[in-house]
Amino acid sequence: MESNLSEREKAVMYGIYKRLPVIVERAEGCRIYSTDGENYLDFLSGIAVNALGYANPKVLHAIEYQIRRYMHLSNYFYQEPQIALAEKLTELTTLSKVYFSNSGAESFEGALKLAAKWGSTRGKKNMYAFSGGFHGRTYGSLSMMDKPLYKEGMGPFLDNKFVLPFNDIDALRAAIDENTCAIALECVQGEGGISMASQEFVNELIALRHRFDFLIIADEIQGGIGRTGKFMSYMHYNNFTPDIVTLAKGIGGGLPLGAILFHERVTDVWVRGNHGTTFGGNAVSCAAGLVVLQEVEEWAQDNAATIGDYLQLRLIELAGSFPADIVEIRGRGLMAGIVLSYDAQEIVDALLQEKVICNVTAGSVVRLLPPLIIGVSEVDEFIHALTKVLRNRATDQQTQS
Ligand SMILES: Cc1ncc(COP(=O)(O)O)c(C=O)c1O
């Protein structure tokens, strides 16, 4: 049955996604095992979802326990897993309340609605985000993004939403005024090529907020939950407290879950009935999420910082050996980008042949998002594979010329 999955996929909207030629049997830790007996080193983590890798025994135990208690009750009920997870999120940040959703786009969409309502009593309507940012596929999110492929033919988009050039302080100063309601920032742009906001840019954002009184939304959907070596990527910046934080991906331990965190400035904006969802804060997802946060707090985010430094070091070393291929190494913790002088797909495909899984972002960037549990030996294994791929490419080119 499984061997003909690629043919049976005809019933699925298959053109939308690029599928890898790997039929997965099972996955454990940072390895994916295929039905043909191969095993792959996973440096993608289900696109930054599997923070603790696959089949983490503590996550499995929490899920099994919760499934037997109850799976879904609806948000009419108090639910222990939701409350415990919200308490943990507020303990690990300076934010004071949590709303649970199901996905990243839904979290970001909710953040825009919340900001709009906050602005409506202050005469503020304009919202800004930055080029290269990714916030999801819904109309609100897309209205705050600039990549044509995601938007072509699907407009009109929302009014009063603008995209400014990333890290451009002059453009920011020129645009922002007393009509500004909110600015959304992805501190480390995942889809945008692992580009990082500069401290100066964030300083300017904070100064402008002080002057014009608007909300800052930090989109931590990809960079949050320990991935960059701190609990949230915004925590790498001095004196930076966002007003709203959006989460998803890693928070659910592999189950669908999203969240919006509220600074106390905005906790009384929504009243009962203003917003809601059927599945958001599902008890099983929250039970898994609590284990993720405990592990991230106890050791996984420190591991991401330490192993991330080692990864950066090895990548920079490699860049020195392949200056014609590698233009730049970007990232923080276990969110890394290898900027190539050509289309990165070729290298990502060749890495798959070496049984390593990663992906392409922003055309020329190989994106690395391994589980936060990897060690030195997995980094060495990755570097070994990449070295081989780059050497083979150089040999091929010499042969051709
Ligand atoms: C930074 C960021 N925001 C929002 C999203 C949208 O999340 P989802 O795909 O869960 O809707 C993503 C997904 O890649 C993301 O990386």
Image: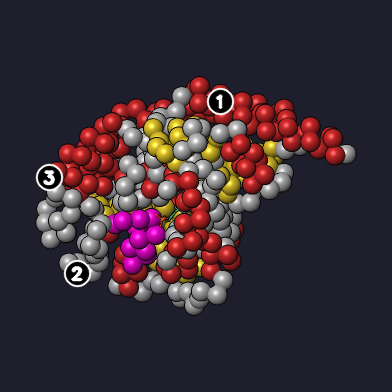
Quick one: label 3 or label 2, which is nearer the N terminus? 3
Residue designated by label 3: 69
Q: Nearer the viewer, mark 1 or mark 2?
A: 1
Residue depicted at 64% across the width and 39% down the height = 350
Pointer 1 local density, CA inside 10 Å: few below 14, some 14–19, many at least 20: few
Residue designated by label 2: 273
Left or right side of 383 for 250: left
Range of residues picked out in magenta = 101-113
Dot 2 amino acid type: Gly
- Residue 396 visible: yes
Quick one: label 1 or label 2, which is nearer the N terminus? 2
Most common SS among magenta residues: helix
Dot 1 amino acid type: Glu
Dot 3 amino acid type: Arg
The image quarter in which residue 329 lies: top right
Q: Quadrant of ligand 1?
A: bottom left
| Nearer the observer, 388 or 325 | 388
| Nearer the observer, 283 or 352 | 352
Q: Residue furthest front?
A: 1
Residue depicted at 16% across the width and 59% down the height = 74
Residue depicted at 45% across the width and 63% down the height = 11
Residue 108 image offset from top left, x and y in percent: 38, 59
Residue designated by label 1: 381
Residue 158 image offset from top left, x and y in percent: 45, 74
Task: For ligand 1, tell me if the residue under mark 3 lies within 8 Å.
Answer: no
Residue 337 in magenta stretch: no
